[in-house]
Image (cartoon, rainbow, N blue to C red):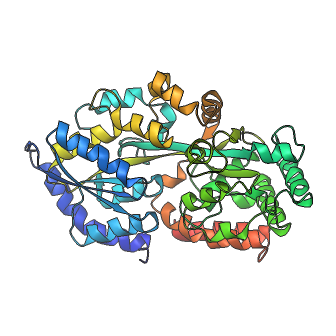
Amino acid sequence: MSRMDRRTFLELAGIAGASTLLAEALPSVARADKPINFSGWVFKPDTVKDYVSFYNQKFTGQVTYEAIPWAQYHPTMETRAFAGEIVDVMYCNHNNRERWFESGLIRAVDDLPGVDELKRKMSPANLDSLKSKDGSKLLGLPYFTSLFVLMYNEPMLAQAGIKAPAKSWDELIDQCLKLKKDKVSDTPFLPNWNASPSGTMPQLMTDCFSEGAQVFDAKNQLIVDQEPGAARALERWQKVYKADLVNPEVLTKTSSTDTHRLMWTGRYAYHTNHSYYLKTIAGEPENSKLAPKKARMTMYPGTGQTYMWTDSYVVNAKTKVLDDAWKFTKFLGGNLNGDWYVQRQWCLISGLDNPYPEMYDHAEIIKSYDRWIDLALLRKQYEKGKVIAAYKEPWYGEYDTRAVPIVHDMIRGNTTVAKGLKDLVKLQKSLA
């Protein structure tokens, strides 16, 4: 499905916005147990079905759930909205949340019961990331939070006589060159360069941050062409690609899920990806040759800073069953059941982190995480998590998609780093 450009989206949604404002001006009528349409991208849909069934049974709900492939999810939801379809509760990734709010597709939730308590329980950075661009509105409740981490194959390093994981990028490259020379691994480095919104561009921001480089300025304008650290990061990417240290297949993967499955094979020494992917790599022997705990994480090289984000559950601005939609949203992203039911399930089943710190004092969570990661080290990495505000700009989603081919051209050496960085800035300015 083709992706609608930002201007078309805003023009069409503006028509819907007028009726949304009128509807919000009318008094709310409580309607218990009305049908609720719920959609999300495909990630463990059987788990989602289980907790939807739990909700329907315990709270006499009538929630129907649909899973849509990740690559098509956001354009599909936008197209359906333009056609008049109302999906009451939806997943929304951080790249699209502000755009959906400004267009009138979703509503803020500050005026709904119980939200103030949830805001007090969230970590400040995650709470800020869920707010509107001007900071005045909360646009949803958290589905999960994550950040990029560096994972390594402990048995492979030991086989090569490498006693500890790399602490710097130069050391990592030297180790990978040794692994290749000694024929321990053909392509020892597995970066997350897939073309989806969860791949190349957040990976680039992470590596820029690790080099001490800013990506956007205080006004959310792209400044990578002025940052020596950004050039160093991309020159390093060119270097490892040219040296055949990276499997070129990573450039053609359509999701971070597909990329991390390559690490299951045990053929790679280092992998950069979302923190929760270590759950299957190191904790699920039925999937991965590196389980149990043969894959580990280490602090990210350089400054240690990595890109952190919060994806969310959002409420459709045109829902006709607001009370019930909000009740279900609090079950998903809040604590309606009294035991953080959904967040706890995601932690236990998939290693998805959440912005409620009290979750990590729970004995069951600590025991579960210990099977696949050093939880204290993960929480230390979260202290280095860096959020940006640029994704709250309505142009960001389109920029994020259209920037990938430019970055891939730099990686392959089809264009110079200096020209590629200027092309990225030119693209961003054309969309702003």
User: Looking at the rendering, in which quadrant would you find the N terminus?
Assistant: bottom left
What residue is at 63 percent from the left and 61 percent from the top? 200
Say if residue 227 shows up in the picture.
yes
What residue is at 43 percent from the left and 40 percent from the top? 346
Furthest-front residue in view?
A: 286
Q: Which of 54 and 381 is in front in this view?
A: 54
Residue 327 place in picture, x, y as percent: 21, 40
Q: Nearer the viewer, residue 95 or 256?
A: 256
Q: Which quarter of the picture shows residue 278?
A: top right
Q: In this view, does 79 lie above or below 333?
A: below
* Relative to 344, 163 lies left or right: right
Q: Which quarter of the picture shows residue 130?
A: top left
- Disc count in the image? 0
What residue is at 59 percent from the left and 46 percent from the top? 285
Say if residue 130 shows up in the picture.
no
Residue 185 place in picture, x, y as percent: 81, 59
What residue is at 62 percent from the left and 53 percent from the top? 216
Residue 324 place in picture, x, y as percent: 17, 44
